[in-house]
Each structure stands twice: as structure tokens, then as C-alpha cells.
Amino acid sequence: MSAATLTAVPADGREARPGLARLTLVELRKMTNTRAGFWLQLAIAALTVVIVVVIAIAGEEPDQRFREMLGAAIQPASILGPIVGVLLVSSEWSQRTAQITFSLVPRRSRVLAAKLLAGIAWCAVAFAASLAAAAVATAAAGAPDAWSMPGALVLQDALYVVISMLGGIAFGAALLSSAPAIVLYFVLPIAWSIVGGLKALEGAARWLDGGRTLAPMIDGTLDGTQWARVLATVAVWIVLPLLIGLWRIIRGEVR
């Protein structure tokens, strides 16, 4: 496995600081130039195609409408994409490239910002691919009245993928170790869903259980209360671990 490195460019007799756009491109390259990253993203693409083909051939007529097809098509990216986000951050430590990266870019917060932008860019590509796959499958299925879908729901589907990716990056930053971050990313929400089923925690679960607050994003347009619950979930499951990760990355010792 290998990781991309930066090359400082001299300017006016001094080394120029790499721009954020360049750092983002480097982080995007890191997503694919390892075996794990390459095969994981290949699996996401393959699963997306398989899902829409199966629905187009054997699915019920209501499932062959574009809105349902798109909701199914984004599932591989939203479920497995966060693992790509975890590896994007944690691989700096597991592959021992953090010292090189932070030597070339001393402001570590800029590196994390580049990783976040790279994750969002990855989501844009993944969503565009899902959108195209869903459109082709919907046309092939030929279900009646299949193309009716609010524009707001398309944006919610895209945001759903982005939120999932940012969650993976946040857990990777907070733990800086691939295996624990991947396990906890999946286990903690499931555990909270189970605990949230208790009557005493029902009220909190309606606001902080991602399974309840985020799932409606791909089912229909959200109202104000539902958006508030999404923001509460994002604050606890993404913003908080991301802040912890930022603190660890800035203050932590690099070996």
C-alpha cells in the first residue's frame, strides 16, 4: 500500500505553501492509490449497478419509479462510503505518512480541511454516478409515471450521502485508527438505536437516533421539525467527533 505525498514548489526563493485546492486533489488521490481504497470503491460501483439492475428486472412497479430507484442506488455509497472517509484520515497514522504530510503542511487544520473537501468531492461523483444509474434503470424498467420526483428530494438524497461520508471522516479523525473507527462508526449508532427504544430515552432518540432522523431524507421532503432533528443528529455524531479529531490532530505527537 502506498500514500500520495506533496512536493513543495519554490516561489521567489522560498517554498510556497500548497494551496487548499492542491491539497484536496492530493487527498482525492489518496482515496484510490491504496488497495483497500481502490477495491472498496470498485465494490461500491458494482453494488450500485447490481441493485438498480435487480430492481429494474425483478422489482415491483412502485419500486421502479425514479425516486425509489435513486434512494436504492445511493445506499452503497452511503453505507460503504464512510469507510473510505475513515481510511482517508486514519491511514496517515497506520501508514506512518503523517510526519511527511505535516512536515510539508505544518498547519494541520488545513490538511483536515482538505480531507473534508475531498470527501465532499467524492460524494458529488458518487451521487452523480448513482443518479445516472438510477435514470438508466428507470428508463429500462418503463414503469408508468416513473419520473415524478420533487427537486428538493434529489438534494436531500445528495445531502444524505454527504452526511454519511462526513461521519466516517469524523470518526476517523477522532480515533486515528482504522479498525476501531470503522467498528465504532457502525456499532455506536446501532447500540444507541437499541437503547433509544427504552421508554425513558424515547424523546432523546427521536432527535439523536440517526436511523430515525436521517432515513426520512430519502423518503420525502422534510419539514422544519425533521430538519431540526437532522441538525441535532449531525451535531452529536459528526461535529462533536470532528472537533475531537481536530484537537487530537493539532495537539497530537506525530511519529
Image (spheres, rainbow, N blue to C red):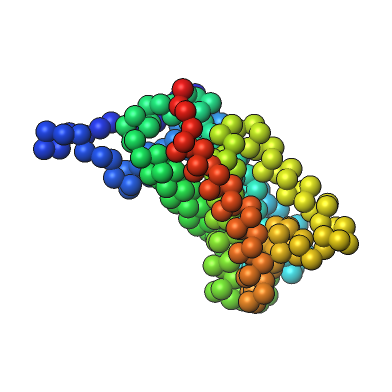
Residue 174 % position (x, y): 57, 40
Viewer-side residue, 83 vs 99? 99
> Which residue in the rendered view is the most extreme toward the left?
12
The image shows residue 223, relative to residue 117, as above or below, that is below
Residue 40 % position (x, y): 58, 37
Q: Can the viewer see residue 241?
A: yes
Viewer-side residue, 36 vs 240? 240
Residue 248 % position (x, y): 51, 38
The image shows residue 108, relative to residue 219, as above or below, that is above
> How many tags in the picture?
0
Task: Residue at 67%, 71% (x, y): give it.
Answer: 226
> Which residue in the rendered view is the most extreme toward the right?
199
Q: Can the viewer see residue 133?
A: no
Residue 35 % position (x, y): 53, 28
User: In the rendered view, does 94 fall on the left or right side of 108?
Assistant: right
User: In the rendered view, does 113 fall on the left or right side of 182?
Assistant: left
Viewer-side residue, 72 vs 51? 72
Task: Residue at 67%, 67% (x, y): give it.
Answer: 229
> Which residue in the rendered view is the most extreme toward the front?
251
User: In the rendered view, does 251 fall on the left or right side of 196?
Assistant: left
The image shows residue 135, relative to residue 87, as above or below, that is below
Task: Residue at 82%, 63% (x, y): give it.
Answer: 202
Task: Residue at 56%, 53% (x, y): give it.
Answer: 239
